[in-house]
Image: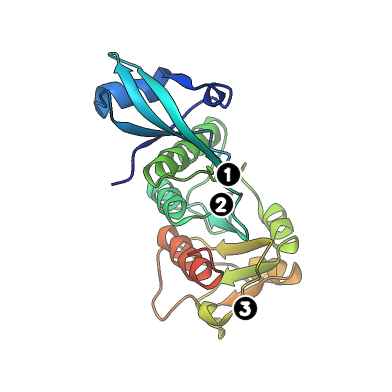
Amino acid sequence: MSPPLFLSDPARLESDRILLDGPEGRHAAAVRRLRPGERVDLGDGAGVLVECVVTSAERDSLRLEARARRRVPRPDPRIVVVQALPKGDRGELAVETMTEVGVDVIVPWTAARCVTQWRGERRAKALARWRGAAREAAKQSRRAWLPEVTEPADTATAAERVRGAALAVILHEEADRPLSRVDVPATGDIVVVVGPEGGLTDDEVAAFEAAGGVTTLLGPTVLRTSTAGVAAAAVLLSRGGRW
């Protein structure tokens, strides 16, 4: 079993003797109950990984000895999912599973038919939950790079993501072209647009197509918006060589 991963301030990772304290240290010592001699990985969420061994454990912190360091290159091509806001806690579920499979950027999108709307204080709280879900899922899946969860986007902003992509696909149940037959570029951003429970409007499809996106069919069944992104990412990651 691979050792657990905890996140640390980049400056601390330069030392051979590292103190892991704060929330991460408390979790490692009090929840995971790691003890001297056990292996631990530390990361900065931006490609640096340090292989460590626990030298001492306190109630809410660990002291670690660094044994090896490595830098993991930024993934390329990048998978960017423009995710329409799901209902309830399905947003965090979508973020969690997309992080686990390897999605690099998640763009919360306020589509026209979204039941959920992020306004006022709710916007900040919901965005914090998404980012927290991404952080925890990245640690669980031992990712060297944390995924970016951007500020919420409207359709015009999301269309700009599509415009700048090496490939942009719009998941649409009425499309004729299967996602599995799309040519996947070797580098650049691959953008996936996932609509809300009520589906995409004609205006949204037109905006994304005008920006260079192509409508594609994910499969013979209709998936929830919270699971479509992870399924599409899996197809693209396997065909693009990252899996």
**How are the residues colored?**
rainbow
> Extreme bottom residue here?
176
Q: Which mark is residue 148?
A: 1
The three-letter code of the residue at mark 2 reads: Asp
N-terminal of the two: label 2 or label 1?
Answer: 2
Contact, mark 2 vs mark 3 (Cβ under 8 Å): no
N-terminal of the two: label 1 or label 3?
Answer: 1
- Front residue (pair 215, 196): 215
**Distance of label 2 from label 3 (alpha carbons):** 19 Å
Disc 3 on helix, strand or loop?
loop
**Distance of label 1 from label 3 (alpha carbons):** 25 Å
Disc 2 on helix, strand or loop?
loop
**Distance of label 2 from label 1 (alpha carbons):** 6 Å
- Front residue (pair 171, 116): 171
N-terminal of the two: label 2 or label 3?
Answer: 2
Q: Which mark is residue 183?
A: 3
Q: Is residue 135 above or below residue 30?
A: below
Q: Position of residue 82 (x, y in %)?
A: 58, 57
Q: Residue at x 44, y 66 (%)?
A: 231
Can you see residue 49? Answer: no
- Front residue (pair 112, 211): 211
Reading the image, the residue beneath label 2 is 104
The three-letter code of the residue at mark 1 reads: Glu
Q: Position of residue 190 (x, y in %)?
A: 63, 63
151 on left or right of 55? right
Disc 1 on helix, strand or loop?
strand
